[in-house]
Amino acid sequence: MFLLTIRTGIKTVLIAASLHLLVCSLPAQPTNETRQLPPVTVEGAAPPSIPQADTSAATTVSGDAVRPGQITSVRDLTAQTPNLTVFDGNNDRAPKFSIRGLRENNFGVGEPVIGMYVDDVPYFDVNSRGLSLYDVQDLQFARGEQGTLFGASGAGGVMNITTKQPGNDWHGSTTLSYGDYNTESYQIGLGGALIKDQLYLNLAGLYGFRDGYVHNLFLGTHPDTQDTLGGRAELLWKPSEPWTIAFTATGERFHDGFVSTYRPGTFIFFVPPPAPAPPPAAPDPSPFSVRRDLDGFVHTADDSQALKTSYDAGPAIISSVTTHRDWKQNLLQDFDFSPVNFARGFSQPRIEQWGEEIRLKSPDSADRCKWLAGLYFLDNDLRANSGYVGGTPSVTDSDGQTYAAFGQGTYTVLDKLDLTAGLRATFDDRSIHGQVVNANPLSPGYGGPSPINSSADFSAVQPKFAAAWHFMPQTEIYASVAQGYQSGGFNSFINNTAYQPARSWEYELGAKSSWYDNKLTANAALFYTDTQGYQVIRINPANPLAANLLNAHRASSYGAELELTAKPVTDLELSALAGYTCATYDNFLDPTSGKQLAGTPISFVPEFTAALSATYHLPWHTYIRGEVIGVGRYHLDDSGLATSGPTVQDTYELVNVQAGYESKNFGIYIFAKNVFDRHYFNNALNFGPGSGATSLILQPGDPATCGLALTARF
């Protein structure tokens, strides 16, 4: 009752403040003021906050695209850069990235392939990146290994999210939206100078709610509801000209129902003889109609703090970012996927991170020689408690420390040729201890948990070499080669067994160009990646609640990417991007199935991604916008164990539209997403015949939605 009162109070404050801003911003009559343009989502130039990015394919998404009906969370970023797809994990608050044939494993197991920063705070794990996006300035993607430039970089690249920063003039904004499924969203932001030119404050908040998409026919409920509350505060201090000091604090709370996964085939929950097994469960009627005796829930909380210091010493700029994050989740689900009360699984992971990143770089005015050097430290403590209700749980503490030194320099020869060299050295210290359940604890023959107490070290030295030729003022071609790395770690459900690092060589050839005063931009890239020790997930045959990571001996991927933006006439903006990827195992004897999977496509790597958008400005500050996102065919499973149900997601397209009025201070628009209600699967788990399952368990993507939004700014 107390929490409900707090939530209601916060919601009331947000609504009242938003309505006040809306009323204050309404124009008395039509004016000829400069209109606030809808977003150009893809920009041709490399983002300025990613240093020395001329030799990497890079994309910027405008913060104006982060709003209801377009982008509201990390999981909405599919196809916003070529070959990027975001899949769900074991719930839709745990996104997993797939890019250029490198993909993260679901079920909260394994190492990230993308490094993610939000205002210099790293989010470098596979569990805690399901962030809501609001008050965003821009989102930047640099594809390919960036470990010589960033402390928290993955083999697939870096995503850098920047929120709006305060200045001397006070500014405010608010957005109210309502849509079907009783979707409500309230956002507000406020920032400005407390002391002119010295002390600044920025505040932002979000509250949102929606009913579930899935109908539980057995209970007559809609289990996958969502309830989101978040806030961010930044205090920025400039005591003197060379110094900048900032303290940021963010917090998010998600109270969600569990997404009831679709079971397309008969499911037999495996219990070894002589224990009686429940009767086989019939297939679910559809992806959004299931039969479960338990709705389940996923409650998640995340808070972080960061202290950022920068000193401009003239010949060099020195910066330090100290971060702390605390993330926890409480999950309960129906694990027999049926209306029979037989197996209920729970998971209660908690992550605490401490990090430090120090950078020393050349001044922004540097011309012929640009350089950067840094040190990085991350302490990641994952405490996990999972199992079946009524059974013995697995309780583990996985502790990891990462130490890295990195640097990169670019030197310009003859005014047109940039030569780049970089090096990174990484040392990872991993340990795990606790007790694990390696067999089904619901079986009468279950012998109890097993202790686990292991540690191991992993290391890598990663070089990078690149060259860029600026043969015309706004046109260049480049080539690069870099080594990618994903750390090893421990499988908590296989005693004293570690999975090994994945090491890759990444080759890229590309071109960037801008024409007619940036009215036309065109970027293109070709890539090839050769990976040793590719990390692959498999469900533990002895315990369906457990997942383990294996190493494929060798895998490779290659592909092409294209980005275009155009403004052929004053009121028309066009954007197109596309990426193609072919990713296969070259040598992988799967110990789970005993099959040689050489030549098999890697699961959750779409053959292509594509996005086309057009925005046309009409008279009286009105506009229309259309977007088509295409995702190519991808495999939902690559083990060959599934005996029924779909194992491939065919190509699908999502059509999104907007229309509205938008001036300098006020806007109103209607939107629709997935207009044609295309059904597709955004996650799958294969429990395999060894555990009694005869089909994949699938998680559907979002259905068609529509709504109305109001915005105000001052």
Image (cartoon, rainbow, N blue to C red):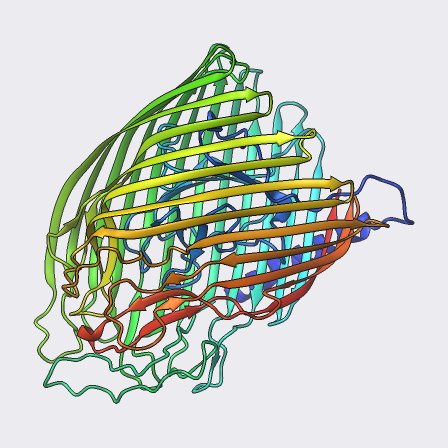
Q: Percent x, y for residue 534?
A: 25, 48
User: Residue at image x 15%, y 70%?
Assistant: 542
Position of residue 139 in the picture relative to residue 259 (left or right): right
**Residue at screen point 38% across, 48% down:** 326
Q: Determine whether, in the image, residue 594 is placed left or right of residue 583.
A: left
Q: Quadrant of residue 95?
A: bottom left
Task: Please identify the quarter of the rendering in which residue 405 is found.
Answer: top left
Q: Residue at x 20, y 56 (%)?
A: 396
Q: Eyeballing the image, is 676 above or below 141?
A: below
Q: How many marks?
A: 0
Return the x and y of residue 590 as percentages of the image width and height: 17, 59
Q: Position of residue 255 (x, y in %)?
A: 47, 64
Look at the picture and state if 375 lies above or below 248: above
Q: Residue 387 at x, y = what percent?
A: 24, 68
Q: Residue at x 28, y 55 (%)?
A: 109
Residue most toward the right? 29
Q: Is residue 136 visible?
A: no
Given residues 288 and 259, the one toward you in this image is: 288
Task: Judge left or right: residue 331 versus residue 288.
Answer: left
Please identify the quadrant where the C terminus is shown: top right
Q: Between residues 37 and 399, which one lies in front from this camera angle?
A: 37
Q: Is any part of residue 568 visible from this angle?
A: yes
Which one is nearer the viewer's eye here, 21 or 712? 712
